[in-house]
């Protein structure tokens, strides 16, 4: 753990303003190739980021290394209605983010592989330059959350057609909140709630997976990722439930990949993310009472529901040098219309994503891949969402563009 506390923050510096809000706040896909196919990857590993979707996938990609970076641009907007501070507030004073990725895999023998995948597993960011009056802010308001995973992975081919994989997920988080002065005092269990600079959190979990090749054309996959148990944000013990606890939710999923012909591949994933099982994410704002303050054991959170994401993707090998991809991703809405007020800080309301991608094979057999994603504008209108009266409405859309370089070792 001492080593990880030195290495993980250094890696996180590569993504000092990570901001995802796609399938809730998990990324729609991991690895540029997967991102170009709607995020599919449970039954279709394509690079050394495969462990992020399904650890078993690392057993099917051979010896390779991959580096990539994604430019991400979320546009966030909130509206207050029926309050003393009615108006539209844009949380985009920081809106351009670079998100890196890295993967390495080695085939030890025909049955065993060892590798590592490094990726950002979601995150949230809002930056309201002029603050949110109902939050009591005078200057800038918002939050900044970075989540980074380093996943050492081993796979075993237990039969010629069945591969299992195990990742140990070493996680690092960095968090900062600004402009929440209105909650200090009678609403919080401690003063550690806002404007305390960045705080760090460390933790670990496990991720297991299976891929079975039914025949030369069809593969199935299944995966389960445990809750990642994180150390507490001490500087924000008065904000998050359980005195600053902010674990990363568990998730599970199923996938299928079909090689329709030698050039055309179709794939689909279904993933469930258990946001409601983390108190600081799933607890309702209604939990905030004079006897149950922010930061308490069962304190208020963002009120997020669990999310189901359906991912569809296709790839077509136009020739030996060029493969093109497309995909679609739909996730259920995590934010109830009664929970929009606190989610001014985390308006992750987008649900529908379309993607395009391509890979060019170079003369030395290395590859360059690109992926574009657009999440269509979506909104959630508040319904009795502010306890003192009035409503908060949320709106967001997103774009991203990723590039990666990979090669077989």
Image (cartoon, helix red, strand yellow):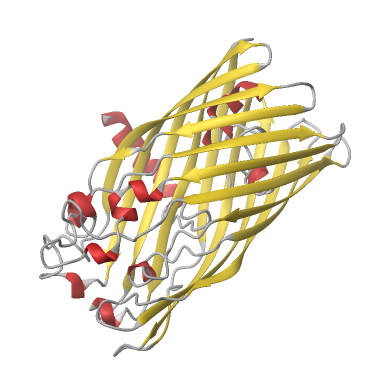
Asked which quadrant contains residue 382, the reply is: bottom left
Quadrant in the picture for the C terminus: top right
Q: Is residue 50 left or right of residue 4?
A: right
Asked which quadrant contains residue 32, the reply is: top right
Q: Is residue 135 left or right of residue 343?
A: left
Q: Residue at x 63, y 17 (%)?
A: 162
Residue 63 in sight from this viewpoint: no
Looking at the picture, tell me which residue is in the foreground, 364 or 109: 109
Q: Is residue 259 left or right of residue 190?
A: right
Please provide percent x and percent y for residue 330. Answer: 61, 55
Asked which quadrant contains residue 261, the reply is: top right
Image: 261 above or below 271: above
Looking at the picture, tell me which residue is in the foreground, 175 or 355: 355
Residue 124 in sight from this viewpoint: yes
User: How many numbered marks does the figure carry?
Assistant: 0
Quadrant in the picture for the N terminus: top left
Q: Residue at x 32, y 88 (%)?
A: 85
Q: Is residue 20 left or right of residue 256?
A: left
Please provide percent x and percent y for residue 282. Answer: 34, 54
Please provide percent x and percent y for residue 59. Answer: 61, 21
Image: 181 above or below 326: below
Looking at the picture, tell me which residue is in the foreground, 300 or 324: 300
């Amino acid at each position: 753990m001492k080593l990880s506390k030195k290495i993980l923050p250094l890696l996180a510096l590569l993504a000092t303003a990570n901001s995802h809000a796609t399938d809730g706040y998990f990324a729609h896909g991991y690895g540029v190739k997967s991102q170009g196919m709607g995020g599919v990857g449970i039954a279709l590993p394509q690079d050394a980021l495969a462990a992020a979707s399904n650890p078993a996938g690392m057993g099917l990609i051979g010896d390779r290394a991959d580096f990539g970076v994604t430019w991400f641009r979320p546009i966030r907007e909130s509206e207050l209605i029926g309050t003393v501070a009615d108006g539209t507030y844009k949380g985009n004073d920081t809106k351009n983010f670079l998100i890196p990725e890295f993967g390495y895999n080695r085939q030890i023998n025909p049955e065993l592989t060892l590798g590592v995948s490094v990726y950002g597993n979601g995150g949230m960011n809002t930056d309201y330059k002029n603050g949110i009056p109902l939050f009591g802010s005078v200057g800038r308001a918002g939050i900044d959350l970075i989540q980074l995973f380093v996943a050492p992975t081993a796979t075993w081919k237990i039969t010629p057609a069945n591969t299992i994989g195990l990742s140990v997920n070493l996680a690092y988080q960095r968090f900062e909140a600004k402009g929440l002065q209105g909650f200090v005092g009678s609403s919080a269990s401690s003063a550690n709630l806002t404007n305390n600079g960045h705080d760090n959190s460390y933790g670990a979990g496990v991720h297991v997976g299976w891929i079975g090749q039914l025949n030369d054309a069809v593969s199935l996959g299944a995966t389960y990722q445990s809750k990642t148990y994180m150390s507490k944000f001490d500087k924000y013990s008065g904000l998050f439930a359980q005195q600053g606890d902010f674990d990363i939710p568990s998730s599970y999923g199923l996938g299928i990949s079909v090689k329709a012909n030698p050039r055309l591949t179709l794939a689909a994933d279904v993933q469930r993310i258990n946001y409601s099982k983390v108190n600081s994410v799933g607890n309702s704002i209604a939990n905030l009472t004079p006897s149950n303050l922010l930061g308490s054991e069962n304190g208020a959170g963002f009120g997020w529901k669990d999310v189901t994401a359906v991912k569809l993707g296709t790839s077509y090998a136009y020739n030996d040098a060029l493969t093109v991809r497309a995909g679609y991703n739909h996730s259920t809405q995590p934010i109830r219309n009664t929970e929009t007020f606190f989610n001014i800080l985390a308006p992750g309301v987008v649900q529908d994503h379309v993607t395009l991608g391509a890979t060019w094979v170079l003369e030395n057999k290395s590859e360059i891949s690109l992926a574009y994603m657009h999440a269509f504008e979506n909104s959630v209108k508040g319904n009795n969402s502010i306890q003192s009266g009035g409503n908060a409405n949320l709106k967001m859309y997103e774009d991203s563009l990723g590039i990666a370089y990979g090669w077989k070792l």
